[in-house]
Amino acid sequence: MIVTTTEAVPGFRTTECLGQVFGVVVRSRGLGGNVMAGLRSIVGGEIHEYTSLVEDTRRHAIDRLVQNATAMGADAVVMMRFDSGEIGQSMNEVVAYGTAVRLARA
Amino acid sequence: MSPTARNVGLGFAGLMVVGGLLLRPLGSGTALIVLGCLLLIGLVFEQRYRRGRSDPRPGPGWQRTGEKFRDEETGQWLEVWFHPESGERRYVAVGSD
């Protein structure tokens, strides 16, 4: 499965557009992680607990996107983008979205 | 979370519980015990995505995607493998083959 942020995949031509595909995840770091992040924010610097939360969420969202695209019979997801937001101050929402397509060698 | 930060958190939670227990004879400390216990539970049972962060090397039928990145928590370089039939992705430590 090719996942690309570009409209076209070099070396291939798009033969069929299967439609939009999504991977949506909302994750929380949990009370322990949030408290440790709060303590770390006293002195500043990188908040590793939240870096890990966003990284976990990114991986989870793109894994879901690829699984959904595979279920649609796609060869690739083009124009893939991430979007993120927060829910209830301690929850991180990430959506990975793009267009599922079928490809043939150019 | 690094093991050090986790141990600091566990120690902090333990101190809250002990402090709460010491305050019990004075008629207070319940809130401290409850908060300490919640923090302990939060740290011990914290759910992460793919705990351990690195999957075992996949068998036949898996393809390398070429995607590679550094896991900031473990410092390991990971590469992504893909199974075309299930659509599953795996994060495998570079050099584990």
Image: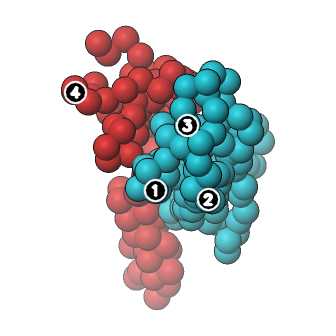
Q: Which residue is mark 2?
A: A19
Q: Is B8 placed above or below A24 here?
A: above
The kind of residue on which mark 2 rests is Gly
Q: Chain of mark 1?
A: A
**Cα distance, mark 1 to mark 3?**
13 Å
Identify the amino acid type marked 3: Leu
Marks 3/4: CA–CA distance: 26 Å
Residue occupying image coordinates x 51% and y 21%: B66
Residue at image coords 63%, 59% = A20
Residue at the (71%, 44%) spot, across then down: A79
> Mark 2 falls within which chain?
A
In front of the other: B94 or B89 = B89
Q: Amino acid at mark 1?
A: Met
Q: For the view shown, which residue lies furthest in the left direction? A: B59
Q: Which residue is mark 4?
A: B59
Is residue A82 among what the camera can see? yes
The picture's colour for chain A is cyan
The chain that appears red in the image is: B
Tell me the amino acid under the disc marked 4.
Gly
Label 1, label 2: how far apart the Cα atoms are: 9 Å
Q: Nearer the viewer, residue B28 or B33?
A: B33
Please name the residue that numbered disc 3 is placed on: A103
Q: Quadrant of residue A7?
A: top right
Other-residue count near label 4 (Cα within 10 Å), few / some / many at <14 / 14–19 / ≥20: few
Which residue is more in the foreground, A90 or B35? A90
Q: x and y percent of residue B30 in the render?
A: 45, 82
Label 2 crowd (10 A; few <14 / some 14-19 / many >=20): few
Q: Which mark is residue A72?
A: 1
Chain under disc 3: A
Helix, strand or loop at mark 4: loop
Chain identity of mark 4:
B
